[in-house]
Image (spheres, rainbow, N blue to C red):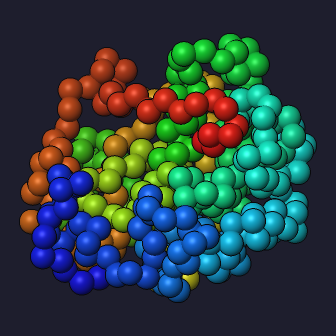
Amino acid sequence: MPAQTGVSAANPLATPDVTPAALPAAMPAASPAASPAATPAPASRWDGPWLDPVRRGLAEAGDAALAGRWDACAARLSALAAERGLVNENGRPIRFVDARGVHADAYEAHIWRTGEVPTRADAAGAWHDFFNALVWLAFPRTKARLNRLQARRIETDGIGARRGGVRDAATLFDENAVLVPCADARAAAALRAFDWRALFVARRADFSDAMAVLGFGHALMDKLRAPFKGVCAHAWVLEGGEAAAIVRALRDAPPGAGLEPALAARLDALAAASLDEASLRPERFTPLPVLGVPGWWPGNADPAFYDDVRVFRPGRARRAGGRAPQPAPRRQPDSPRAGP
């Protein structure tokens, strides 16, 4: 990606080589001013590593999205879900339906009850919901588990001004998570301690042996249509024998090929199994500035990239339980018309 010459006022944490202006015009920037249907985007390379898990779905439905043909896109996504036999944990087949026609209960409760995923077809939310559908196709078991956990809490607690810890964490995961299978306890410890130089500089040559970072949150993917240095994900670290085997398989995979379906299914099963009401808490996440991940941004090959303490912050004071406190998620409306 070419370097740019200015600093974006909209992104105060950006540095000259990581602002949205540096991006090629190959992919529509986040929050387009005009309707996607009225302003089709040129062909995209879809080359961000954060999109590797959804690259297969992009190849199958991306053309309709780029053309702004959102009704056709939703129909194609639903057909792909049917071909793959996607169901939620209530046994309902997953379908992507026009959000304008859904006027029922809370978003997650509606998906649980009907299998219908309200999907917007307007400039304000079409790309966001498109990435949501792609993640359903890539990681159906994990998405279904998150939906079940949210729906059960809604059934128990109802809809109120506060979501509660489980729903807060489920929302963080759904919107902004990266999955981090780890094969090296020292690397996991460095990530949790915000020891960026140990993780990304001193042990850079060994990074792919130690861990992998895979995009999951659909709001994160939407945001990364216009990357800037301050973009921060919520890392969900997965450890143990299967996580280490997945790291090795990803290390040995051809670059740029996306996530092979059988390996995606293994990662999906591992992530889904890690989610329950006891473990799914906001403090379980570790903040991760994603453009610092080796291979995710050209500028991070220079060790000075990590000198910006506004982004690569030192370790914060820990809670008694061990991990750093997390910011509360921005509260989203529970209406299915608003989307996740």
Vertical placement of 192 versus 296: above or below? above
Give the x, y percent position of residue 19: 24, 66
Say which of 248 and 26 sits in front. Answer: 26
Give the x, y percent position of residue 82: 88, 63
**Residue lying at 72% horizontally and 69% vertically, measured from the top left:** 73
Vertical placement of 132 versus 334: above or below? below
| Side of 258 relative to 197 (left or right) | right
Give the x, y percent position of residue 228: 28, 61
**Residue lying at 57% horizontally and 44% vertically, measured from the top left:** 174
| Side of 268 relative to 8 (left or right) | right
Quadrant containing the N terminus is: bottom left
Give the x, y percent position of residue 253: 53, 80
Vertical placement of 231 versus 334: above or below? below
Residue 273 seen in this snapshot:
no
**Residue lying at 33% horizontally and 27% vertically, measured from the top left:** 325
Quadrant containing the C terminus is: top right
- Residue 92 occupies which quadrant of the picture? top right
Say which of 7 and 313 sits in front. Answer: 7
Residue 12 seen in this snapshot:
yes
- Residue 306 occupies which quadrant of the picture? bottom left
